[in-house]
Image: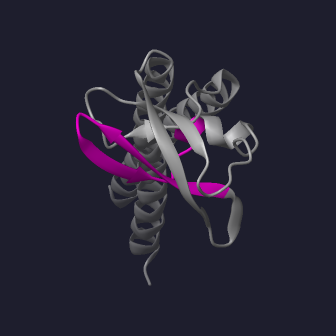
Amino acid sequence: MSAELKSKSDISIVLFFFTALAVFGFAGGGFFVHDYARARASQSWPAAEGIVLSRLQGEPSRVRYVYSVAGRSYESTRERVFLARLLNGPAGQYRPGQSLTVYVNPEEPAYAVIEPGGAGAAFILCSVLSGLAVFFGVGGVFWALTRSAGAEFNLVGDAA
């Protein structure tokens, strides 16, 4: 394999890695901002009465529950929004048949939580990690492109 082909292959792999890192950083950041906004909004969602149907197999601290909004029944296993699950322990211990209060998203009644709110520390940590992924991803792409351009310049200079 010629040195030029090996160099282009190496640069392509590095570019792919840093591009993927930047894309995951942007996507993760968007997801975490959306989830945190939903967590904050859940604190003012209307409450509905629900009933615990069963515990989830393999996860005894999680439950399956049913609730009703505007005459329509919904079923869920969601206790909290995603970020709140990262730092908080399991929700309260609920038993099948027990009544509970469910906080329902008025714009999307199929989305409800047992415990509203979120985890600000988890949001900050995940946002920082997403920002670092974007920073290093974009920086790595820039570095790889400048290195590639420099290698091309040296190859052209050596040929002359």
Residue situated in front as seen by the camera: 67 or 113: 67
| Residue placed most toward the observer, 3 or 68 | 68
Residue 103: % across, % down: 46, 30
Q: Pinpoint residue 84: horizontal percent, then vertical percent.
A: 62, 35
Location of the N terminus by quadrant is bottom left
The residue depicted at 63 percent of the width and 72 percent of the height is 57
* Quarter assignment of residue 116: top right
Relative horizontal placement of residue 104, taking residue 57 as reference (left or right): left
Q: How is the image coloured?
A: one colour
**Residue 84 lies in the magenta-colored region:** no
Q: Is residue 82 magenta?
A: yes
Q: Is residue 125 above or below residue 5?
A: above
Q: Is residue 34 above or below residue 145?
A: above
**Residue 64 on image: x %, y %:** 53, 57
Displayed quadrant of residue 41: top left
150 shown above or below 47: below
Residue in the foreground of this view, choosing between 28 and 144: 28
Residue 100 visible? The answer is yes
Q: Which residues are magenta?
A: 62-83
- The residue positioned 68% from the left and 72% from the top of the image is 58
Q: Choose between 30 and 10: the one closer to the eye.
A: 30
Q: Is residue 88 left or right of residue 26?
A: right
